[in-house]
Image: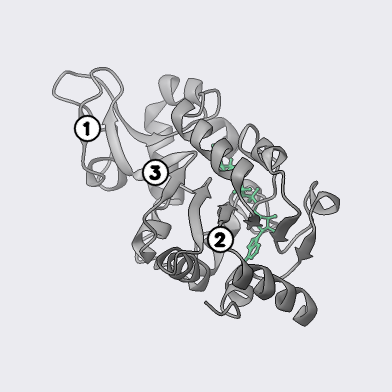
Amino acid sequence: MDIEGIRKLNDWVRESDNIVFFGGAGVSTESGIPDFRSVDGLYHQKWKYPPEQILSHSFFERNPEEYYRFHREKLVIEGVKPNRAHLKLAELEQAGKLRAVITQNIDGLHQEAGSKKVLELHGSILRAYCSRCRKPYPQEVINHGEGVPRCSCGGVIRPDIVLYEEPLDQDIMEESVRLIRNAEVLIIGGTSLNVYPAAGLIRYYRGSRLVLVNLGETPYDSYADLVIHEKIGEVFSQITV
Ligand code: OAD
């Protein structure tokens, strides 16, 4: 364990009431959801098409059957629970120290842990809507059953997630920029910082307490004021609120 790093992180957390957290798939691996780019992640598993292609707008339009096979087999994981990282973030918000969680994850685990202010850059698989008339549908329709779910209007029902080739929600992006620009402490965790525009958000931070908690190295390691290469749940369980 990086005792020195964790001590510094604890000092910065104690001294601030304006912390923002920005995270990715690595936040949920300790809950049993594989990430995308680690060796045992989703992108290294065998599938008929590369997952990046299946998770794209044009693929969904062309081949919704195959998309839904992948979605139900790989994106929907039953029985997952928030881990120590999710729970600590909810606790920090409750204590008036954390302003927001900005996440690339689509699993809803931050909200389940009790976090109130969660900005979902890539949407959520817990919401669905008709791609033609935009009527909302409960998540069971997309996450369970078989085949391609259809709306009463005949349109294909889709998950409320951002697929490759699709733009991010402008309001969520703008609010994320504002929060990061004004943050005193920015903690980034469990993300390879490889996917844009989300990864570019880090550039808006203007403070001097940028913390990176990630198992592997990232392209932004030299940019951070503190880097901890450990499991985020283990690190966060040692933060005292
Ligand atoms: P990645 O899979 O690219 O990166 C996850 C990072 O988390 C890796 O650098 C791991 O080393 C690290 N990691 C894994 N477990 C960890 C743990 N317990 N503690 C700390 N770090 C850990 O996932 P993201 O960066 O989230 O987009 O990927 C970004 C986007 O790419 C996703 O939102 C998704 C994907 O394609 C879309 O689907 C649009």
Amino acid carrying label 1: it is Pro
Numbered tag placed on residue 111 in the rendering: none
Amino acid carrying label 2: it is Val
Crowding at label 3, few (<14), some or many (≥20) Cα neighbours within 10 Å?
Answer: some
Q: Are marks 2 and 1 in contact (CB under 8 Å)?
A: no
Asked whether mark 2 lies closer than 8 Å to ligand 1, one says: yes
Point out the tag, 1 or 3, that comes first from the N-terminus: 3
CA gap between label 1 and label 3 equals 13 Å
Numbered tag placed on residue 124 in the rendering: 3
Q: Is residue 224 left or right of residue 65?
A: right
Relative height, residue 95 to residue 52 (above, below): below
Foreground pick, 101 / 168: 101
**Outermost right residue:** 222
CA gap between label 2 and label 1 equals 28 Å
Residue linked to disc 2:
27
Relative height, residue 85 to residue 75 (above, below): below
Foreground pick, 121 / 107: 121
Residue linked to disc 1:
136
Residue, x 16% and y 18% (percent of image)? 153
Residue 192 in sight in this render: yes
Crowding at label 2, few (<14), some or many (≥20) Cα neighbours within 10 Å?
Answer: many
Point out the tag, 2 or 3, that comes first from the N-terminus: 2
Residue, x 63% and y 58% (percent of image)? 189
The percent coordinates of residue 225 (x first, y second) are 80, 58
Q: Is label 1 in a helix, a strand or a loop?
A: strand
Foreground pick, 48 / 113: 113
The percent coordinates of residue 158 (x first, y second) are 33, 31
The percent coordinates of residue 227 (x first, y second) are 78, 63
Residue 55 in sight in this render: no
Residue, x 81% and y 53% (percent of image)? 221
